[in-house]
Amino acid sequence: MTPMSKVELFAAIRRDSRVEGLSVRALARKHGVHRRVVREALSGAWPAPRKKMAPRGSRLDPFKPAIDGILRADLDAPAKQRHTIQRIYDRLVAEYEMEGVSYSTVADYVSKRRGQVRAEAGRGPAEVFVPQKHSPGMDAEVDFGDVWILLRGVSTKCFLFVFRMSYSGKAVHRVFATCGQEAFLEGHVHALRVLGGVPRGRCATTT
């Protein structure tokens, strides 16, 4: 037997109440439903519309104000000092103790918000970006970022070498005392050894 729709169930409950004069308890027992359903059927012929589920929150939500703050600060920074997505991700992990959020989630939000933040600040229309498409194992990006460490109890500025595969987002990091050519080459050797291979496409320097 095909089960009744809710509209048909309501009609049957109302009919039995009118014709047989059954109580709420008896109607609930006869139709195998909760008494709350019986009362709803007797109060109106049509079931109440199903409530929409509230949108699920994202693990990134607590960190969105920090990202927006970084993007607003970048508006007044020289081009070479503006944050790449990788630097934003690294700061969220190091300074805000972000866990359980993927690089791609941060990248999607930053890509969307960067232009919006610019427009909100009255710096003209949102910048238009040409989407990039990367194939597995083909391309990589390299960047140096400032990092401060305690060296023998003294706060010392060093440089964080970041080698990131463009498709997967897998990254290799190493801290150097300088960001000169020797550190640049040594960072590549270390990253390629860790990754176990060389990208078949190109390696872009973002600094």
Image (spheres, helix red, strand yellow):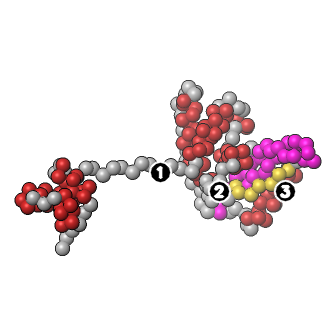
| Tag 3 and tag 1, C-beta contact below 8 Å | no
Three-letter amino acid code at the position of disc 2 = Gly
Report the residue marked by disc 3: 186
Report the residue marked by disc 2: 169
Relative image position of residue 87 (x, y in whole percent):
70, 46
In the rendered image, the vertical position of residue 34 relative to residue 152, given as above or below: below
In the rendered image, the vertical position of residue 35 relative to residue 107, given as above or below: below
Three-letter amino acid code at the position of disc 1 = Arg
* Residue range (magenta): 137-163
Horizontal side, residue 153 vs residue 60: left or right: right
CA distance for labels 3 and 1: 44 Å
Residue positioned 18% across, 63% down in the render = 26
**Is residue 129 located in the magenta-colored stretch of the structure?**
no
Relative image position of residue 166 (x, y in whole percent):
64, 55
Residue 56's mark? 1
Which tag, 3 or 2, sits closer to the chain's start? 2
Residue positioned 62% across, 56% down in the render = 100
